[in-house]
Image: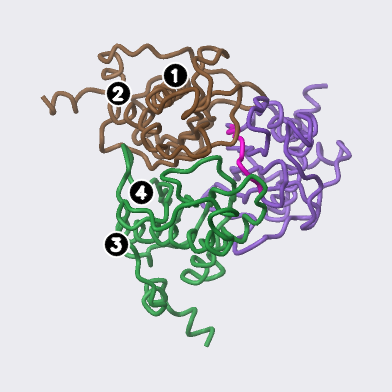
Chain colours: A purple, B green, C brown
Amino acid sequence: MNTAANAMSAEQRLAESGIVLPPPPSPFGSYVEAVRTGNLVYFSGMVPVWGHEPRVRGRIGADLTTEQGKEAAEQAMLSGLSAAREFLGSIDQVTRVIKVAVYMLTTPDFIEHPKVADGATDLMERLFGKEKLPVRLVSGLGSAPLGMPVIVEFVLEVA
Amino acid sequence: MNTAANAMSAEQRLAESGIVLPPPPSPFGSYVEAVRTGNLVYFSGMVPVWGHEPRVRGRIGADLTTEQGKEAAEQAMLSGLSAAREFLGSIDQVTRVIKVAVYMLTTPDFIEHPKVADGATDLMERLFGKEKLPVRLVSGLGSAPLGMPVIVEFVLEVA
Amino acid sequence: MNTAANAMSAEQRLAESGIVLPPPPSPFGSYVEAVRTGNLVYFSGMVPVWGHEPRVRGRIGADLTTEQGKEAAEQAMLSGLSAAREFLGSIDQVTRVIKVAVYMLTTPDFIEHPKVADGATDLMERLFGKEKLPVRLVSGLGSAPLGMPVIVEFVLEVA
């Protein structure tokens, strides 16, 4: 069973999961969503949007629970996957997830950043497998674009 | 006309723009301003200074308007270009702007981060052209060195 | 004397310093502590812990002095060195420290970020020498995991 799971590609796992990717994100200013240099693809900070419309707003610890923050991190990561698929043609091009940084808007005394960030990296583990897990940075923001609770920045390695 | 513009190098565009670069920044501690590894050049976080003197201080949304924040982002990026020219000899060595991260000191409910960040990346677009635009991260700080409103971090690709 | 010092390896300097590295850090969620791609090794955000236990908590400028913040930055960097040694076998594999980012939890009007960050990069200079100093980013957080005062993120180049 594990063997079968491991034999599946990331695109197959995504299809099986029933997850619907949001439309590929488009810039809010003078930048692009993805840049390749050598075998690395850098991505812009991803937010939980559908088009340019926030799917969620607010501060974790006040307006949103930790669990809702985690969902927002997953939504931002899904925008990132949509950007990755558009840029690469298929997320099966990914040989390793290198880095995921999860910036979150919280109350000043919030301390459960790792639980929120798991929303982004659990998704990557599910699609790419434990052996491709990235390094991770978590941090708490002072303010955030459009008042959205998370920003997810990431770097992928491709063949 | 566009053709002529595209044929100009980044140094030529900078000269034509009339922009005066600040002196190359020097460290505030135990670090350097630029490090090359392979074809990438990483730069330290750049702030709007002239020498070690802040050109602007304050929190965007309270002490400074969004437009003033945008100008501060441009000033920080200019310090970055000055560092890049010193390190590379000429900014014409740049084959691609890979990443620009704009960290900004704002009021807690500020939401116009993309407009502030455009101050840095509009400048890069003007000098290097649309086809070399980077990925971008924006985020709101809780506090900032010397009370300056922006920090700009960036990575360049060189030949 | 300088010649002798320069001839020593980073592992030798660490041994001579009498510094005791904390145990290698282990993840607080779905990520790993280090990922290699090409000649670069990315590390997760490091915090001042011993195991999963914070060695220090609080906000610099209120609960902690700048000097205590600097010590916390050194402790987080030591966790990073412990991770590096575990991943690489020896810190003598490091050919260059590429980047160190020091995120710190402070009062809103704190401005001495460079002094705090020197806690991390002074240590790197002592072990690897001035010629391997990295670029550096400093920034002030709105909140931090487990209420710890610093997070140190870094990238190393290896042979």
- What is the chain identity of the residue bearing mark 4? B
Q: Which mark is residue C8?
A: none
Q: Chain of mark 1?
A: C
Determine the residue positioned at 59% across, 29% down. C144
Is A35 in front, or is A114?
A: A114
Magenta region? A136-144
For label 3, count other residues whose C-alpha is less than 10 Å away and answer few (under 14), some (14-19) or many (20+): few
Q: Position of residue C40 (x, y in %)?
A: 45, 37
- Nearest to N terminus: mark 4 or mark 3: 4
Q: Which residue is mark 2?
A: C10
| Pointer 3 residue | B89
User: Between marks 3 and 2, how big is the CA–CA gap?
Assistant: 32 Å
In the drawing, what numbered circle is on residue B34? 4
Task: Calculate the distance from the C-alpha at mark 3 to the C-alpha at mark 1.
Answer: 37 Å
Residue sitting at 52 percent across and 62 percent down? B68
Q: Is residue B99 left or right of residue B51?
A: right
Regarding mark 1 in the picture, which secondary structure is present there? helix
Indicate left or right for B75 with A10 as reference: left
Quadrant where the N terminus of chain C lies? Answer: top left
Q: Which residue is mark 1?
A: C82
Amino acid type assigned to the residue bearing label 4 in the image:
Ala
Q: Are marks 4 and 3 in contact (CB under 8 Å)?
A: no
Number of residue marks: 4
Q: Which dot, 4 or 2, sits closer to the camera? A: 4
